[in-house]
């Protein structure tokens, strides 16, 4: 059957009916990529997979939630949607609003939104307002506006977002033919960890003998780790801007996912995040954004800690939540070497690549 997006594929698990107008960009169905080089590099005995959510239509997993949230908004006649966003939610909301022919308002925190994400919101003609405050301020304002005016809030406090996002867990179960032993993922506003846990529980309930429950391993950035610290963070700071959140909306359900699954929610430093970001790109050819790499940084941290008995991991999936092209500045300026400048002749070019070729 031709793939037509996750609502069509997973209808029976989602709160839609025959009259729901499906607003889709054929999101979902993203690759689960086995990471052999990476496993060798970090020296672990087990199967590691990357779920590359950067392959969604707007380049992040937010599209899974947005197809549901916008379809349901249109179903009830909404003409305007609003979101607070560190970038990817706005890119996705703007695209799905354009697809639906409705308006989109975006509140972004001052500074710190990656260039690629902003360019998407602008291209899809969202009304973008940069507020003098952080993400948490933006979310509070968006909630207030949607309470007072006929505007639908499409942040992950909108339950349809969680419904759409849980389908990624279904896809993983189907690809592996079972659930993984561990799932590693970034935690920001904590909607996604809530969604995955819900998804794994759905499959477990439907076929308990086939689909066990994985341990949920969530990672915040150390400068923005409210759940780990046990209190909200007034000025969250991290290079991983997509998880620069000080007071997660889905805090409680994230804790439940961790506790019910016997997993952990821990933190990784910006240094660890950047290292993981580089290793994934260099060993597997997969370019994810910095926030996504916190899942991999978490896995590396737990391997080093000796968390896995006899260094045996079983099957582990790291969620790569967004595409690296979203944030090219981090890749080019803060991180890797700049391109070497050489004269346009054979001799100088050979000199430039002498380290990587053998004659
Ligand atoms: C939104 C986002 C996250 C965080 O997801 P939450 O549901 O807020 O925890 C992580 N990575 C990327 C790339 C994102 O866009």
Image: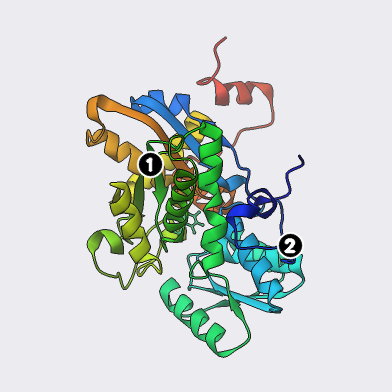
Q: Give the quarter of the image for residue 16.
A: bottom right
Label 2 neighbour load within 10 Å: few <14, some 14-19, many 20+: few
Instruction: Return the residue found at the far top.
Output: 359
* Vertical comparison of 237 with 30: above or below: below
- Asked if residue 65 shows in the view, the reply is yes
Answer with left or right where residue 112 lies relative to residue 117: left
Give the number of the disc on residue 325. Answer: none
Give the number of the disc on residue 18. Answer: 2
Q: Quadrant of the C terminus?
A: top right
Image coordinates for residue 144, horizontal then vertical, percent: 50, 85
Q: Disc 2, ligand 1: is the CB inside 8 Å?
A: no
Cα separation, mark 2 vs mark 1, equals 33 Å
Answer with left or right where residue 95 lies relative to residue 213: right
Give the number of the disc on residue 214. Answer: 1
Task: Please tell me whether mark 2 or mark 1 is closer to you in this view.
Answer: 2
Image coordinates for residue 111, horizontal then vertical, percent: 48, 69
Image coordinates for residue 319, horizontal then vertical, percent: 47, 44
Q: Give the quarter of the image for residue 71.
A: bottom right
Q: Earlier in the sequence, mark 2 or mark 1?
A: 2
Image coordinates for residue 232, horizontal then vertical, percent: 29, 70
Task: Please name the residue shown 47% across and 56% down the image.
Answer: 195
Instruction: Return the residue found at the far bottom.
Output: 148
SS class of the residue under badge 1? loop
């Amino acid at each position: 059957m031709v793939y037509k997006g996750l609502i069509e594929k997973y209808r029976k698990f989602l709160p839609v009916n025959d009259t729901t107008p499906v607003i889709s960009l054929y999101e979902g169905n993203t690759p689960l990529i086995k990471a052999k080089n990476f496993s060798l590099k970090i020296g672990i005995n087990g199967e590691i997979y990357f779920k590359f959510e950067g392959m969604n239509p707007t380049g992040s997993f937010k599209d899974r939630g947005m197809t549901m949230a916008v379809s349901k908004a249109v179903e009830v006649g909404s003409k305007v949607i609003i979101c607070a966003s560190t970038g990817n939610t706005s890119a996705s909301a703007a695209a799905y609003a354009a697809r639906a022919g409705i308006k989109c308002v975006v509140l972004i925190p001052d500074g710190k939104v990656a260039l690629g994400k902003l360019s998407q919101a602008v291209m899809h003609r969202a009304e973008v307002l940069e507020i003098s405050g952080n993400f948490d301020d933006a979310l509070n304002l968006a909630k207030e506006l949607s309470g007072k005016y006929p505007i639908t809030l499409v942040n992950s406090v909108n339950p349809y977002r969680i419904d759409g996002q849980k389908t990624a867990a279904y896809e993983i179960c189907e690809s592996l033919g079972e659930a993984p032993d561990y799932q590693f993922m970034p935690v920001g506003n904590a909607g996604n960890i809530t969604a995955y846990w819900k998804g794994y529980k759905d499959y477990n309930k439907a076929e308990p003998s086939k689909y066990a429950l994985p341990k949920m391993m969530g990672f915040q950035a150390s400068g923005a780790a409210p759940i780990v610290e046990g209190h909200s963070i007034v000025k969250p700071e991290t290079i991983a801007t997509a998880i620069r959140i000080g007071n997660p909306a889905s805090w409680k359900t994230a804790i439940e996912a961790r506790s019910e699954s016997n997993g952990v929610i821990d933190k990784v430093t910006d240094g660890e995040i950047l290292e993981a970001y580089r290793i994934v790109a260099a060993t597997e050819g997969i370019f994810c954004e910095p926030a996504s790499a916190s899942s991999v940084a978490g896995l590396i941290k737990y391997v080093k800690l000796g968390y896995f008995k006899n260094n045996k991991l079983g099957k582990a999936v790291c969620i790569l939540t967004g595409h690296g092209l979203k944030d090219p500045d981090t890749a080019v300026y803060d991180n890797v070497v700049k391109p070497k400048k050489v004269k346009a002749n054979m001799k100088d070019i050979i000199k430039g690549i002498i380290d990587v070729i053998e004659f």
